[in-house]
Amino acid sequence: MTSCAPPPVLESSTATVDPIVKPAQFLVGKTADELKALMKELGQPAFRAEQLHQWLYVKCERDYDKMTNLAKGFKEVLAAQYGVGPLSVVADQQSADGTRKFLFKTPATEKKPSQNIESVLMHFRDRDVRSVCISSQVGCAVDCSFCATGKMGFKQNLTVAEIVDQYLLAQHLSGEEVRNIVFMGQGEPLLNYDNVVQAIRILNQSAEVGIRHITVSTSGIVPKIYQLAEENMQIVLAVSLHAPDDETRSRIMPINTKWPVADLMEAVHAYVAKTKRRVTIEYVMLKGVNDSQAHAHDLGRLLKGLKCNVNLIPYNPIGDEYDFERPSNEVIVRFLDTVMTYGKKVTVRLERGVDIAAACGQLANQYQ
Ligand code: SF4
């Protein structure tokens, strides 16, 4: 079980220039075998790797001084060469509903500048479940018209360590056990495929997050859905469909012109056939765009025969310059009832953190 360190006091940095660091200079992101190899290289006994593994991934400790079973001299050697994790904390905002939005900073390297990224920690009190929504990229190239992240454009992929570190820091800063991870923050996870898959393996095998408690959400990168099906990972795949027909979907998701609805559904059926896992179909509800009864019937028919649940996401406002509105509750309930007549389980996503721009589609580093 996870036992997290208490929250630290946040300190603001006075540095004006971000130091250049090499990505390999962090311990977070290394697998158990890589830690063993490192200990061998440093002339340490093999059990040191297991001790470090526990401190990093199970106790979520950030401070070498608090790793009490490591020898002082060894800690000094480590600290001189390796940081614990790559991310530093820039801001920590709390919503009225208890949701926390973290702004983290990635390290500058010789190849890329430092960037800010966001993660959101949600507490669903009715079930006493904590879930962290993490980012896979800085910005996003997919440019869905209802999404603040898409408006930032694509900046860079996150490394394995930067992805894993969001989860570890969420636990460390909150001092709470977080057992669910959703890849629904900034970025399209399947466009940073190798790093996301490796991060999932570390989160599962090292941080001990149940693989069925990890959800990857995609806008529909068709070739990568086929590839993911071959990974033999029992994750939850969430597909952002958002419209049942090409005309409506292309209007709000430009990626539909590359991989239209029929191609996407073929890939999703193949994924379910291969993994035997139920998928989640996500559907953001936009007033007057995709919320009609005709859309609801088309959606029900499209999903016939697919092992899936449907999650309706009432649109969250992201600024006056976007001309979308949220449908009324009556429209949403009618839409839900209609899709349910096709034998689907349909839920409406509970809003979290709207007041701090932490809800779905709102992540755009607004602290900046
Ligand atoms: S909804 Fe997801 S895929 Fe679409 S622009 Fe936003 S982050 Fe990218």
Image (spheres, helix red, strand yellow):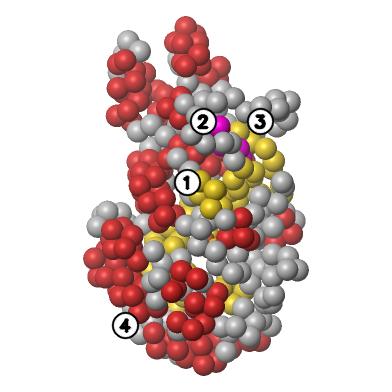
Q: CA distance from mark 2 to mark 4?
A: 48 Å
Residue type for callout 1: Asn
Q: Which residues are magenta?
A: 104-108
Give the foreground label among 2 and 3: 2
Residue at which label 1 appears: 157
Quarter location, residue 149: bottom right
Relative image position of residue 306 (x, y in whole percent): 33, 78
SS at mark 2?
loop
- Which class describes the residues within 10 Å of circle 2: few (<14), some (14-19), or many (20+)? some
Q: Which mark is residue 8?
A: 3
Q: Residue at 70% x, 51% y: name it.
A: 366
Sequence-earlier tag: 2 or 3: 3
Q: Which mark is residue 305?
A: 4
- Which class describes the residues within 10 Å of circle 3: few (<14), some (14-19), or many (20+)? few
Residue type for callout 2: Thr
- In the image, residue 71 above or below residue 53: above
Q: Quadrant of the N terminus?
A: top left
Of the pair 310 and 361, the residue shown nearer to us: 361
Q: Residue at 48% x, 49% y: name it.
A: 136
- Which class describes the residues within 10 Å of circle 4: few (<14), some (14-19), or many (20+)? few
